[in-house]
Image: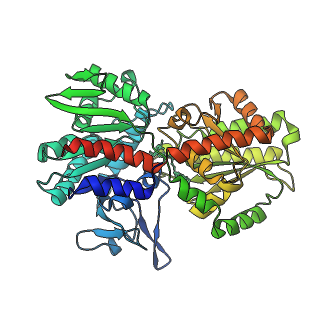
Amino acid sequence: MWTEDSLRGLINERLGDHPFVVVSYREPYVHTFEGRKIQCISPPSGLATALDPLMRASQGLWIACGTGEADGMVVDEESKIGVPPQNPEYTLKRIWLSHDEERGFYWGFSNEALWPLCHIAFASPVFNEGDWNIYKAVNRLFADAVMAEVGSQKALVFIQDYHFALLPRLLKQLNPELIVAQFWHIPWPNHEVFRICPWHEEIVDGLLGNDLLGFHIQYHCFNFLETVDRSLESRIDRENSVVVRGGERTLVKPFPISVDTELLSKNAESPEVEEEIERVVDEYDLEGKCIGIGVDRIDYTKGIPERLKALDRLWEKYPEEKEKVVFVQLGAPSRMRSGGYWGINDRISRMVEDINWKYGTRTWKPIIYLRGNNSPTMLAAFRHIAHFCIVSSLHDGMNLVAKEYISSKTDEDGVLILSEFTGAAKELRDALEINPYDTGDFTQKIVTAIHMDPQERRERMIRLREQVKENNIYTWGSNIVSEILSLKGD
Ligand code: GDG
């Protein structure tokens, strides 16, 4: 089983003195103001959650956009800061984007074009040429930032996600000695879908600048290879999952991402979380109730309205469940500057209000909706006490919430209801699988979760816990880092 120490050992032993650089849009630590004081928070992002332990083990350099209002006040003259702030183990270098750059690169092309294009959630992508030009310019800006750090050295650059599809090719042109790898955290759709992007060939060519390209699951790798095959001149060695283009090779492989299972389990039993459990049970009147939870970045891909529809059907069809079951939806507002997200926020609030109005009584509120950047302690408390957790994404690369829930159930007692359209569903076979669009079956699965025999509940949870224990974030880190290190060839 991989641990933080064994990953650190692997990196120390095999990295040698090659610099290790991670590039992402999202930074792992954000500095903001609380009144006049500066505070440091960890953003609610799956990517940051997953990569922070890997960086702590490698002690490398992470280049990301500075997005916090106080970010500029805590860095040195090179825009760098040691993190985690209490006990620095690696360096964060912040890149500053202008409003126009942020608008075109992040809000525009990344989140209004690529995000809906790659997720099959029936939201139309917006392809704006101005945004595309800014996306290209910001990818060049990051290429320059990496080069300023590594120069002509043989460094290892590990790029994150869909914000940087063009960066690998740019880096290889600037320094052919670099080993470049990228992990694509979201799904890759089939060619029929991807080719509607007017610039799909440039995107695919940019990604083929990578020596290694990782996705969560094999299916996304196949879709990518099919897209390459049908868009560009290249040779595909399907047996070894390698694309050869212009004499250069790109290995395409699945690496299912995970969480720090051990740390989450330990936290679940900490005195801080125990105290928080007492507080939330008291504040939300949860004593003796069957508690269900949902924990999401509020995003139209997460299937939150579909989940509320199934809960509505539950209390309509099974009135005996009234007063007994409480569902707590924790939601972190996300991408609120993008018009596409206002609708989903309004829709969820209206649905929650409607359900509470229809079924609620003076002594019972069916749905408790906690919208905000909820603290990690509060999330841990709810995960620990929840009898069931619902993950109902319409499409999701992996979904870390499912694995966080399992990791927090140290009492081995709880049921995970999981959408078949998540990458996580490929591994977590002991979850109750749902199709979020099939409201009738979804409701039935909630009923099954509420009434599951305690023995079966425990057996399923034990097997789920074994799965995430073995395939934890350090397993992901070790597999992908071993593959990157083996590309270095010395
Ligand atoms: C992308 C891919 C892939 C949620 N609400 C709050 C909060 N969260 C945390 C969760 C979890 C994270 O945010 C969300 O992770 P997910 O994996 O569910 O989703 P994305 O953000 O869409 O991540 C996804 C992931 O990258 C990693 O590759 O799994 O498929 O879409 O950690 O706990 N955190 C806090 N307050 C909240 O209210 N603090």
- Give residue 44's position: percent from left, percent from top: 50, 56
* In-front residue for pair 67/184: 184
Residue drawn 47% across and 62% down?
42
How are the colours assigned in the image?
rainbow
Q: Is residue 90 left or right of residue 47?
A: left
- Give residue 394's position: percent from left, percent from top: 55, 34
Q: Is residue 366 visible?
A: yes
The answer to whether residue 22 is above or below residue 466 is: below
Q: Is residue 336 left or right of residue 208?
A: right
Residue drawn 87% across and 38% down?
319
Question: How many numbered marks are there?
Answer: 0
Tell me the quarter of the picture where residue 391 sits: top right
Question: Which residue lies most toward the bottom here?
Answer: 36
Q: Is residue 312 visible?
A: no
- Give residue 347's position: percent from left, percent from top: 62, 43
Residue drawn 43% across and 55% down?
48
Residue drawn 63% across and 62% down?
378
Q: Is residue 168 left or right of residue 476?
A: left
Tell me the quarter of the picture where residue 235 sits: top left
The answer to whether residue 130 is above or below residue 27 is: above
Q: Is residue 174 left or right of residue 229?
A: left
* In-front residue for pair 31/135: 31
* In-front residue for pair 73/239: 239
- Give residue 478's position: percent from left, percent from top: 38, 47
